[in-house]
């Protein structure tokens, strides 16, 4: 039985708590939040759980094996570092930290301490993304040509981070996990309409070796909720629409065949249109699967699907995107 | 009665021919195409119409009042210039020409000759875009904050131009016509997967005064056909989905209210969610309306909604986008 | 504070429990279920609540003010009758009972005891149906001409009742509440594909005075989930699609104008197509609103929106539909 | 080369004319219509074709091999009979005639004359229905359990027939062609809201041997256009949505497994949910395929997919539905 201390009982923390509670390998030992009202709610829901406003208590408590951090991103580094140093396993909400430097430090610290450091890139654990990975890994799509994601809605405006730091971690982590290529540069544009210099709409382009291109549209000020990803392959193409209740992934046996002729103007392009397949997806909550995986990693020494390396990769892209916006779209190398 | 000579009877020309034929103010006088098979088809469909492979014949024919050009873009300048010089009115397919310099020359020539020079930005004449313009002009949306368009499908790969020159003219002309602001810079990324250096997927960002941002995703290699534009306003927002058979435009009484407090971190953002209105759209073919407008401009000296100035503006953005792609996304000024 | 005893902790009971718990005017006093496993779950979730397998204990307990019944329908009459006789207010799951005779008895008993007897026609409390009622009551639709509902999916096959008794109570209660007309006859067809003589697909037609017609398609064996109701009015029409996350109700300013001429063959029918309006709906759980209403009725002597009269009306239609199926669609009078 | 005379150039006739014209095995010889305006339009579109208001001329003309009839249904019998008697092949718009008696007479007459008598059940020739037939014939769906079709929109009110005679022929002919079972009885309800006793909304139920049930909802007064058919099988299920531009048919590997236990209340029902397959459909106009088939039948003595027998079957159901409506839903035998 793994004793878990949860830091942060705001927006996402309660989901963490519920999934810890429902996992037979974990026990929700303590909850920490600075906000009195949040703590009251935690006490009411979990009568037997220690509730405190002091994170130190959790770190110092020898009974606690693992710390879950669901606090604002600018606190991630310090909290995770303390937890690791005191020998706790750590699951930290995305993004891992707010700087590549601190993300790398955490990664090294976890390695030195021999503890699990997992980043809560929740979507990676969803049946849809797991299926997507299988499809791409199978090679059925042929060469992956582009990856396009739209993640927009009338969303919760954050007060400390812009829309890229809030929403793009989902796309970057899904892209990393399923396609597995590392971008060479990042270019981004964005705009802030709230007067606080935090972009609420942004476009991020990632450049790769060969002609693979990835692009994200993230937006907190859209009238409709869209969660749609297109993946173009040389043989087949995929649409992943997370708003569909069940038919989230469609595989299109559709594309073009390029038949070189004499000279480029002679290139013959033939279109193919075949059947569409909609794979059945297991109906399980991603966070539940993630918790099982966290337990598995702690108990059996496995490497998390979303380990600290994946966490660093995400922060690298975010930091570069931020820098590119400042420089009006100049591509920033992240070799 | 305006006698019309049509040059080009390939993909789009036949639609032009049909709409000239059905317009009571015009007569389809001649059809010109270099391709024998296309000419045969023209002869079969329009028995009484002069069919020729020599454009000169049309220019020289004093009976012909107006020339419609539906040929590859690299021929537009020369054909339109000849027509104008010989005193014909001209309707030229989009984009107007393949260079800003030649587009400007045509514009000056038309002015000097006192002839109508109209660019076939067809969408501008659609009931949906006309309604969009009314909505935006009414001020109901408040300040326009962003304009986002996705125009993708498994499309006809062109052999002489990339996907931006093929599809983005629609978006640029709709944006210009409805929002009416001029961009200051253009940034673009794209990729070619066919081996001919013509991009088949591209992302174009347009920067404007204040914080207004426009973005187009154009793609010839997408598994699904999407024609969707989001327009974010400070008071209301619009979704224009051209794939919807009738409910193309939805106006969302949705948005945020920014209430400044002490310091930026205190800014209070209140969300508003109200009714949605779906205006009724006339069910008429845009090209039919465009032809009526062309007649009206010729007969009554009106300035076309899509005049040569609008044509030049579109080519400016295209040329800058092309240049930006070459420089990997560096923003190109188009002051 | 109203003390509530809940009987039945199977499929629907836990939702009842949660909403009682979250209502500040109620206290979840006891839970009763015959199934040991269900009781264990109840004990785990609600540590302070009395859990028992004997309903008698709840009826006998003077502290309990109201009984909520969420058990199989064939037990409703007996349980509700006992509760009422011992002076409890009652909220009983739909359908009220499995016979018109017993439904009427309960109704009379509640009146005699002066207690609230409310039927859990949950949809009536949904923001969508509340809005529907307002639209219809306003007269904006003109005369109501037809009401058509499709309520199908791959559903939970019940072992004691057929698909009509399971799903049609929703449609009948919504129809009664919003349109308010009483049907004169019921005709129904159905089929059983499981070998247990319980229909899993059925069509129910309700006939009314004048030319108003209502029709329900209910189906447990459909590949897709559809919850769609069309309401045709002489001036406007409504589509209520409960599967839409937010845009559940659309009002179409669409219809025909009948202009009598000489003789019926001369009748001129003019079509009207105008705007569509999508009213904003409050985002609240219907059961939460229902619980507040139950409290309001108990404390302030109000008549429930879904009172015993409404409950009887629903059972009347169900019983007649059942009889009609037996007689292969012969219409059954329910004057 | 088959010379064709077309009678009727109103709503559907022009589509017939165009498809005859574009078929290389046919020549559009003559067009007949009683309406002067329709004839003028015919003359304008088809300069070389004989246009007349007298059908006799067509029957008498020895050059004409086949007659296509696209006139009001009450004229079908007389026109088709005359054509057949004078040795013409006949393609008659659906429904074949307005009475079973006359439909049977035509059928016999065609047999006696040795001529092709084909009924224009256009949908049967669509790639979607052809694919549907293949799916059902393959046995992949298992036993066919139910067939449910909704065919509604704000439609053209007919002045001589009700909505069943107008729209249900599509459903009946598709059902007959794909499932191939003959109904034993028909029950129907409908309502007229125009004051001319012609139903504009109707529900038709067809009963078959075993527990197979078919049901059609047809409606001229619906705010939205729906063309959706559900086919429930014991192993798989199909949704055929004709409004989808390309993904018209979806095959759901979804259903239940019935596992008999001790006693019916013990029956275990297991749910299966698997992948969905969307077969690619050829993009061809059904009427074009139908014309090719008509030529093939005439030239090669083949039996039309929609022969006179199929035509009679459709009229049988229509007549019975009409009678059932008169008797308020009493099922009418059509053994």
Image (tube, coloured by chain):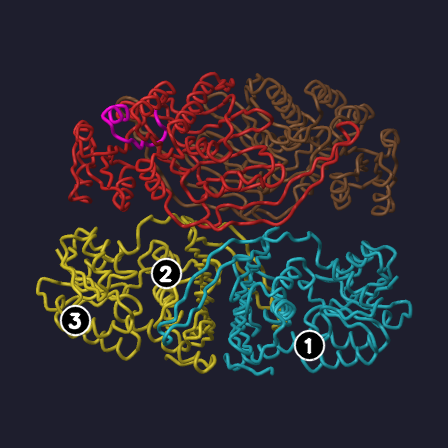
Chain colours: A yellow, B cyan, C red, D brown
Quarter of the image containing the N terminus of chain B?
bottom right
Q: Where residue D218 sits in the image (x, y, percent)?
A: 59, 33
Observer-nearest residue: B334 or B196? B334
Observer-nearest residue: D251 or D269? D269
For mark 1, what is the residue? B312
Quadrant of residue C144 within the rendered picture: top right
Label annotation for residue A137: 2
Q: Secondary structure at mark 3?
A: helix
Q: Are marks 1 and 3 on the same chain?
A: no
> Gap between marks 1 and 2, in whole Å?
47 Å
Chain bearing tag 2 is A
Q: Where residue C165 sits in the image (x, y, percent)?
A: 39, 27
Residue contact between numbered discs 1 and 2, judged by CB atoms under 8 Å: no
Can the viewer see residue C131?
Answer: yes
For mark 3, what is the residue? A84
Quadrant of residue B99 within the rendered picture: bottom right
């Amino acid at each position: 039985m793994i004793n878990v201390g949860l830091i942060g009982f705001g927006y996402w923390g309660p989901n963490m708590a519920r999934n810890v509670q429902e996992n037979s390998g974990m026990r929700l030992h303590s909850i920490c939040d600075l906000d009195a009202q949040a703590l009251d709610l935690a006490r009411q829901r979990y009568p037997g759980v220690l509730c405190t406003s002091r994170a130190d208590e959790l770190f110092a408590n020898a009974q606690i094996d693992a710390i879950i951090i669901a606090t604002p991103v600018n606190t991630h580094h310090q909290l995770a570092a303390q937890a690791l140093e005191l020998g706790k396993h750590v699951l930290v909400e995305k993004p891992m930290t707010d700087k590549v430097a601190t993300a790398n430090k955490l990664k090294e610290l976890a390695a030195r301490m021999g503890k699990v450091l997992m980043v809560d890139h929740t979507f990676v654990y969803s049946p849809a993304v797991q299926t997507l990975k299988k499809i791409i890994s199978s090679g059925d799509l042929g060469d992956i040509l582009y990856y396009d994601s739209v993640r927009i809605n009338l969303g919760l405006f954050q007060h400390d981070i812009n829309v890229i730091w809030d929403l793009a971690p989902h796309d970057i982590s899904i892209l990393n996990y399923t396609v597995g290529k590392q971008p060479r540069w990042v270019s981004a544009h964005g705009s802030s309409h709230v007067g606080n210099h935090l972009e609420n709409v942004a476009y991020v382009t990632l450049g790769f070796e060969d002609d693979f291109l990835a692009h994200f549209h993230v937006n907190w000020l859209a009238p409709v909720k869209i969660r749609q990803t297109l993946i173009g392959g040389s043989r087949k193409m995929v649409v992943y629409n997370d708003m569909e209740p069940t038919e989230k992934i469609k595989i299109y046996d559709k594309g073009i065949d390029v038949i070189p002729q004499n000279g480029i103007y002679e290139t013959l392009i033939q279109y193919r249109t075949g059947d569409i397949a909609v794979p059945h997806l297991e109906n399980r909550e991603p966070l539940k699967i993630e918790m099982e995986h966290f337990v598995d990693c702690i108990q059996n020494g496995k490497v998390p699907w979303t380990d600290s390396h994946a966490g660093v990769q995400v922060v690298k892209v975010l930091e570069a995107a931020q820098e590119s916006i400042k420089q009006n779209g100049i591509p920033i190398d992240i070799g």
